Image (spheres, rainbow, N blue to C red):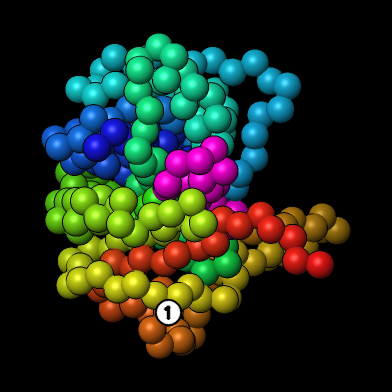
Amino acid sequence: MKILITNDDGYSAPGLVALAKILHQQHEIFVIAPSSNQSGISQAMSAQHKLQFIKQIQYEYACFSVTGTPSDCVRLGIPILKQKYNFQPQLVISGINNGANQGRDLHYSGTFGGAREAIIQGYPAISMSFKHYNLTVEQLMEHCSKYLSLIVNKALEITSLSHVVNVNFTTNMIGIKVCEMEKEIIWQLSSQIETNLAQHVIQRHGFQSYKQGLDFELLVNGYATVSYVSASLKCEC
């Protein structure tokens, strides 16, 4: 299968490198990813900015960095791949993100934004994330390889242009569950006032309990989660 890979953590992030190394063994891949961390950028694009498209030669797979967002990588990358490399992706995968993308906070994610941009451009897409932070390439490959390959091999069956497939992995997985997503928002504003100066930080907060059968609860209990997120832009009046 021909697969375009992007992310929001940057082209050298362990999650992307692990994903590319796994898929490179069985598929024809191109990596086009941000040159710097774009976490939380959602589906933003770099309007009226000059973007650099740079080949990275240190990998065994074809890799390019872009001085922009994940959405830029998809919008810019696909026509370049068509024109210069006669490569038209059958699937776009964004990830593997450093940290889970769950619940309503998914929509802030640059990883999800890259996948949603692919849908808009007419390509089926999967957004992938890993619950735990700062794992090595080797650790991510060990934990994800089995279920990642299973999901990708079924990608053309489970994807469509009406939704983004959102996947979350964790350590020591015991299976895969298709599920709905939690409705809670886990990024909250925290304010602290010191000597008349207010400081505000948006940070994660935990839940006291999880709703049974939704993505949070299943991931905590050792399942990889697969959720279908609508990509529709229809306006209902």
Q: Is residue 155 shown to the viewer in this render?
A: yes
Q: Residues within 10 Å of mark 1 (few under 14, many from 20)?
A: many
Q: Which residue is mark 1?
A: 214
Say which quadrant the N terminus sits in. Answer: top left
Q: Position of residue 117 (x, y in %)?
A: 55, 42
Say which quadrant the C terminus sits in. Answer: bottom right
- What residue is at 49 percent from the left and 22 percent from the top? 79
Q: Position of residue 196 (x, y in %)?
A: 85, 58
- What residue is at 58 percent from the left and 76 percent from the top? 184
Residue furthest to the right: 196
Name the image quarter holding residue 214: bottom left
Q: Main secondary structure of the magenta part?
A: helix
Left or right placement of residue 50 versus residue 149 in this view: right
In this rendering, is residue 42 above or below 207? Answer: above
For badge 1, the amino acid type reads: Leu
Q: Position of residue 149 (x, y in %)?
A: 19, 51
Between 9 and 74, the one lying in front of the other is 74
In this rendering, is residue 154 above or below 7? Answer: below
- What residue is at 50 percent from the left and 32 percent from the top? 74
Name the image quarter holding residue 221: bottom left
Residue furthest to the top: 84
- What residue is at 38 percent from the left and 84 percent from the top? 213
Q: Position of residue 105 (x, y in %)?
A: 57, 62
Left or right placement of residue 114 versus residue 149 in this view: right
The span picked out in magenta is 106-125
Name the image quarter holding residue 165: bottom left
Between 220 and 233, the one lying in front of the other is 233
Residue 122 inside the magenta-drawn segment: yes
